[in-house]
Amino acid sequence: MTRALPRAHFNSSRLVRFLTENALTDAAPAGGDVGQKLGDWLNFRQAIALHGLLNPEPRPDPQPAHMRRAAMMTAEALGKHVDKVRAQLEQSIMQGAPPGSGLARIDMPLPEMDEPIEVKTAFEPYRRFYAAHQRQMESTVQKLRSQVRGQLSKSAGTLQQLATLDTAFESILSEREAALLAKVPKLLEKRFVQAIKQHLKQATELRAEGSEDAPSAQSSVNAWLMPLRQTMRSALLAELDTRLQPTLGLLEAFNQETPQEQ
């Protein structure tokens, strides 16, 4: 009987669903209080700082409301800006950075394998490709998130507080986020190495049988390497979606709180 693939929870991130549905990691168990989990991640100083942000003392607004509104982007303009940056990063992953985007071009390694294949080093070009995209996403999304926060800071008190809170959460969780996302290429490498070993095993068996159909590394690229390359791009797109979630949450709050100002 074929073993059913585990399913991620419908409310998990796109990256978690992708890794689970492609059997790159096990599905995380449901349950658990989000607040309790967050509390477990905070150290003493972070908890005190966060408490102060959640219970702020009233302060006079140093800038008149009409001046703040004059400096604000409309919700539509801000949404278009976020969509544009997202589209540029998606194109960078799939086809290469679009001209004029300011993004460095990061090319996928050529789909060629020299013989004999060195299993221990074969994934290295792909590791560099994935890591370069991770760095590009991190810096670009951080800048975009800061820009959206800046617009919230020019709005009403509740949005100002949300912007301040988001700044704190980014500082608190960024290190943990980076450590978790660094595990993704390691999972992809594991799948990559398994595919290479399977290919080498089949080739050895065919040669031992004296078969003239024993595949070379290059002749079988379409059979095992091309799907892995597409899996890598799909993982990057899923990671981008996950990295953008805080920014999209800020944008949604901005849209809900400022419709009357459009």
Image (cartoon, rainbow, N blue to C red):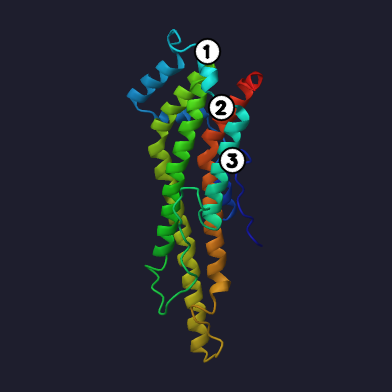
Three-letter amino acid code at disc 2? Met
State the residue at coordinates (54%, 16%). 156
- Mark 3 or mark 2, which is nearer the start of the sequence? 2
Sooner in the amino-acid sequence: mark 1 or mark 3: 1
Question: Considering the image in quadrants, where does the C terminus appear?
Answer: top right
Q: Does label 2 or label 1 sit earlier along the sequence?
A: 1
How much space separates mark 2 and mark 3, taking CA atoms?
A: 15 Å
**Residue pointed to by mark 3:** 83
- Seen at 49% across and 88% down, the residue is 208
**Tag shown at residue 73:** 2
Picture residue at 60% right of the left edge, 27% below the top: 74
Distance (Cα) linking label 2 and label 1: 14 Å
Indicate whether 206 appears above or below 117: below
- Three-letter code, disc 3: Asp
| Mark in front: 2 vs 3 | 2
Along the viewing direction, whichever of 237 and 150 lies nearer the viewer: 150
Instruction: State if disc 3 and disc 2 touch (CB < 8 Å).
Output: no
Q: Is residue 257 left or right of residue 134?
A: right
**Tag 3 secondary structure:** helix
Q: Callout 2 environment at 10 Å: few (<14), some (14 to 19), or many (20+)?
A: some
1 and 3 marks in contact (CB < 8 Å): no
Residue 65 circle label: 1
* Residue type, label 1: Ala
**Front in this rendered view, residue 34 or 192:** 192
